[in-house]
Amino acid sequence: MNLRYVFQELTRRRRRTVIAVIGLSIGIALLVILNALSLAYHEAARAPLKEIGADITVQRPGNVPEEMVGAVFPCSAVTIRRDEIDRIEKVSGVRGMGTALLLWVFDPNRAWIVLGIEPENPVGPSILRNFVKEGRYFAAGKPEALVEAAYARQFGIRPGDSVSIAGRSFPVVGLVDASHAPKIAVANLYLPLPEAQAIAAASKPLQSVSPFAVGDVNLLFIKADPEKITSVASALKGVLGQKTAIATPDSFLKLLGSFFALSDKFTLAASLIAILIAVLIAFKTMAGNVAERTREIGVLKAVGWTQRNVILQLLAESVVQCLIAGILGLLIAFVAAFALGFMTVNIPIPWEMSPTPHFLPGGGAPFYKTLRLPVHIPISLALFAVLLSAVIGGLTGALLGRHISKIKPSEVLRHE
Amino acid sequence: MSEAILVGDDLTKTFDNLTVVKRASIAVGDGEFVSLVGKSGCGKTTLLSLLSGLERPTSGRVTIAGQEISGASEDDLALFRRQNVGFIFQSFNLIPTLCAWENTALPLFPIRMTEAARRRRAAELLDRMELGHRLEHLPAALSGGEKQRVAIARALINNPKIVFADEPTGNLDTATGDAIMAILNRLHREAGMTLLMVTHNAELAKTADRVVRMQDGAVLS
C-alpha cells in the first residue's frame, strides 16, 4: 500500500471522489441524526423524573374523599404502608428511595395542596432547595413551612408569618418559585414529612377513606438501575397491586404520542436503510472505479505488484474515502443536531401526578413539562459512525480488490 | 551470442482450442538486442507474454537468468517480474493520476523504501531520458514521445536483467519513434541493456543485433 498513490487517486479523480463522499456522508449523517433524535426523545421523556432524582414514581389510587373537610388524600394517591415500603426497598434493582405525602387540606376559608417531603433525601422533591427565592430552606428537624411564591403572593404570606394547617401552626421560613420546579413536586405548601404525616394520621375524613399510620406515605420516588427499570416497575405492582400508578421514562415516552412510541422501531428500520444506502453507494462507486481501472491494475501487476499489493491499495483507497465520508457525515449530523436542539418538546404529565384538585382553578387541565429537545451526539455514536464508515470501506475495498486483483495482466494489456 | 539470459524452449500457448504459439523456441543472450518480427496476429505479443512471465505457457519452459518461471504462481511471477524484468508497451500504459516521477517509480511502490529514495531514483532515470524538467507533470500534460520516455524510465527503475518492448513506437509519429529507438539503442550499446522488442516494422527491426521472425505462431529463424 502506498499512501501517496492513495492520495493522488482520491484528489486527482476529484469529481468521482466528491460524489462518493457526499453520497456516503448523507447516509452516515442520516444514521447518526436519527439515532441522536431517538436518544433525545428518550432523554426528554426522562426529564420530569430526572429532575427529582428518580427513575420511577409510585402512587396508589383509591376512593374519592367523602367530604372535602380537613386533610384528605387525592383519589390518585392513597396510603402506601410502611411495611410495603420496606418490601419495595428490597426489590432487586432499587438503588434508592424517597417518600412524600401529598394532602389536600380544606380549612374553613382556604384550601391547600400540601406536600410533605424528606428535606435532605436527594431522591425526591428536596430539589426544591434550589428554587427558594426568598427566605431559606428547611432547617433539620424543625416544624417549618415553605410556601409556593405565587400562592404566597395571592394570599399575602411572607417569610416570618405563620400559617395554620388543619389546626396546626407552622412558621413560614421561605418562598419557593415552583414555576421552575419539577411539575411532579408542585404544591402550595411544603412541610417536613413527619409534620405532614402527623396531620394525615390525625385526620378523621382521611382515615375513613384510607387508613393511615404515622410512617406511611402516599408518594414514592425510586432510583433504579437503568437496565432494571421495567422489571422494578413490574415488581412494584406485585407489592402494591395492579392498579398502582407507576410512572417510568417509558410511560412518559408513550404519552408523547404514537410517532414517538414507535420511534425505536422507526429508528432501527431507518438506520438499517441508511446503512444499506451507504453500503450501496460505497460499493457502486468503488465498483465503477475498479472497472475503469482494470487496465491500470493490469499494468500494476505487469510491473510486479502482487495480488496482495493490489488488494491493499484498493482497500486503503476505499477505507480512506469512506472515512472522509464518515467524518463529513458526522459534521453534517452535528450541524443538524445543533439546529434540532432549538426544537421544544412538551412532555405531558399524567393527570394522577397533578397535585391540583380537578375542582380548583387549573385543576384537571392537562399540564406539560416543556423543554428544549436535548439533541446531542454521544461519543459512542460518533465513534460507531466513523467505525462503520471504515468497515464499509474495508469490506467494499477488500471484496472488489480481491476480485479485480485476480485479472491476468496479459489479458488486459493484449488488446492494444 | 553471449550466454543466454532468456531461454524459451518449445513453447506452445492455446486459448480455447486456438493455438496461438506453436512449439516456439528462442534464446536471447546477455546484453543482446533481439527484434521479434512478423505480421499482425502471428503470435508475437503472446510469445513476448510467455517469455516475460505475463502469461504461462500451455507447454514448454521459460528460463530467465537461470530461473525457470513456467510453473510459478501468479504472485511468484509478479515478484519475479518486479526484480528481473522491465516492460515498454505500445500504449505507454502510464497511470493518469500519477505524475512522471511517480509513474516511473511505480514498480518500487510495493518495496519498503523511503519516498525520497524512490523519487531520487526516478529523477535520475528521467534525467537520462531528458525529462528532468517534467518530473511533476501528469501524463495528460506530456507528449506521446515524453510518455514513452517515462515508460522506458519505468522499465529500467528496477535494474532489470531484460527489457521487453511491445511495439514501442507503434503509437508515435516517425520522428518521435526514431527518437525512442535511438534511446533504446543507446541504452543497449552504452549500458548493455538486454532487449527483446516486438515490432511489425522491418526497418526498426534491423536496428537490433538479431532479428527473429514469426509466422502463424511459429518461430522461423
Image: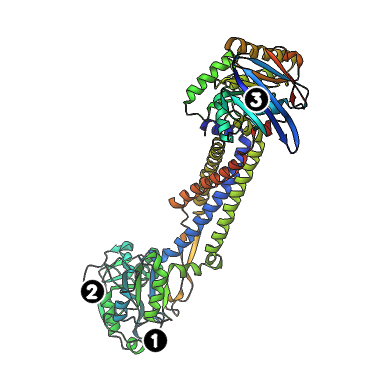
> Which amino acid does the dot numbered 1 rest on?
Pro
Residues indicated by labels 2 and 3 sit on the same polypeptide chain: no
Which numbered disc covers residue A285?
A: none
Question: Which residue in the protein does label 2 denote?
Answer: A143
Subunit of label 3? B
Labels 2 & 3 near each other (Cβ < 8 A): no
Dot 2 or dot 1: first in sequence order is 1
Indicate whether A220 appears above or below B34: below
Indicate whether B146 appears above or below A264: above
Labels 2 & 1 near each other (Cβ < 8 A): no
Q: Position of residue B75 (x, y in %)?
A: 56, 35
Q: Circle 1: is it few (<14), some (14-19), or many (20+) Cα within 10 Å?
A: some
Secondary structure, mark 1, is loop
Distance from Cα at disc 2 to Cα at disc 1: 27 Å
Asked if one can make out residue A343 in the rendered structure from this viewpoint, the answer is no
Which numbered disc covers residue B8?
A: 3
Question: Which residue in the protein does label 1 denote?
Answer: A65
Residue in view at x 72 percent, y 25 percent: B44
Distance from Cα at disc 1 to Cα at disc 3: 110 Å
Indicate whether A20 appears above or below A101: above
Residue in view at x 40 percent, y 84 percent: A62
Q: Is residue A71 left or right of residue A255?
A: left
